[in-house]
Amino acid sequence: MHRPLGITVSRHILDSQRLHPEATGALSSLLAELIVAAKTISAEVNMAGLADILGMSGKTNIQGEDVQKLDEFANNTIKRRMARSGFLCVMTSEEEEDIIPAAEGYEGKYTLAFDPLDGSSNIDVNVNIGTIFSIHRRLTPSGQGSKEDLLQKGREQVAAGYIVYGSSTMLVYTTVEGVHGFTLDPSVGEFYLSHPDIRMPDRGKYYSTNEGNSCRWREPMRRYIDFLKEEDKESSRPRSARYIGSLVADFHRNLIAGGIFLYPGDRKSPEGKLRLLYEASPLAFIAEKAGGRAITDDGRSILDIEPTALHQRVPLIIGCRQDVDVAEEFFAGKR
Ligand code: AHG
Ligand code: MN
Ligand code: MN
């Protein structure tokens, strides 16, 4: 079989590093290490349904090791690998209460915030899940990093991305050089460039929201969703509904095919459900780099929010530029 000579993700990262003569290569190496963690998680995700059949569903597996739930596995894989990467000073994970300092003697100049496995309700039912990451430059001068290093605006990110474990495994990331997508060839264990320079359409075909919450929605959200369901050929309405329940997968579809995702604040959860540091901020960074937009339901730009807590939640409206513009008008009471 002939395989095309694809551009590997490591090649691509090194090529973009070359555009920055001042770069030390630390960010490139950090990403490379994170990609190894992602491939490890991908392999485990692919085995998910087999664990029971292979007798690994008890507390210990055939090697006598403790069997971890997939989200714990993903968390530990990233945490352990990255703590000794030498490029980070501190991390924060959606699965951990407190900050995770880099191992002593391995401190570097970056910080990492991650959602190890996004879409946990989909793990056991063979539906797409993902990993999301966000990288900042540290603020403190040296040693193990602190919370202060992690509580930075999304606008200050130096890189962000996600891996979606779907019909194939894909990595999408951005530094300053645009948004690029890579598909994993599992037989070789390499990510190849499959979606160079991704641009979001100006307007999308889809809307994604959990309509099961509509009894708790506030008026603007109700009216906006009703509007999307009205017939009007010129503005491509009605829009089609698509909701997976894994933010990373819903976002990925909207990034490629065009759409808007909304998880607003409601009567039960005024700040919505999603987390600023691990979910909203990295995806907002990608959306903006791809020509899209991300705001809160009171019209603030996600990337300009000054975080005050690691696990802070934020109402999220993210997607194609024109769609978010229209949603913003509804939420501002202008329509
Ligand atoms: P996580 O699995 O990391 O906790 O995140 C789940 C999130 C997100 O992926 C998704 O968009 C949202 O929860 C779905 O929430 P609802 O079930 O309330 O729709
Ligand atoms: Mn999540
Ligand atoms: Mn998660």
Image (cartoon, rainbow, N blue to C red):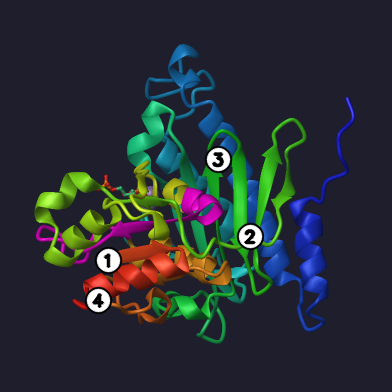
Label 4 vs 1, first from the N-terminus? 4
Inter-mark Cα distance, 2 to 4: 28 Å
Q: Which mark is residue 199?
A: none
Name the residue tied to disc 3.
Answer: 41
The residue wearing badge 1 is 315
State which quarter of the image contains the C terminus. bottom left
Q: Residue furthest front?
A: 233
Label 4 sits on a secondary structure element that is loop
Label 3 sits on what residue type?
A: Ile
Question: Where residue 50 sits: x, y (%)?
Answer: 49, 19
Magenta stretch contains residue 256: yes
Q: Is residue 170 above or below residue 159?
A: above
Distance (Cα) linking label 3 and label 4 = 36 Å
Q: Amino acid at mark 4?
A: Asp
Residue 198, disc: 2
Write down the region rendered in magenta: 252-274
> Residue drawn at (31%, 68%), measured in percent from left and top?
327
Q: Nearer the viewer, mark 3 or mark 4?
A: 4
Mark 2 secondary-structure assignment: loop
Residue 99 in view, yes or no: no
> Picture coordinates of residue 270 (x, y %)?
16, 65
Between 222 and 185, the residue placed more toward the observer is 222
Q: Name the residue located 90 percent from the left edge and 30 percent from the top edge.
A: 2
**Residue that label 4 marks:** 298
Marks 4 and 1 close (CB-CB < 8 Å): yes
Q: Amino acid at mark 2?
A: Ile
Q: CA distance from mark 3 to mark 2?
A: 25 Å
First in residue order: circle 3 vs circle 4: 3
Q: What is the spatial separation of the Cα atoms under label 4 and label 1, in whole angstroms?
A: 9 Å
Q: Does the residue tagged 4 have its C-beta within 8 Å of any atom of ligand 1?
A: no
For the point 55% across and 40% down, the residue is 41
| Relative image position of residue 6 (x, y in whole percent) | 83, 46
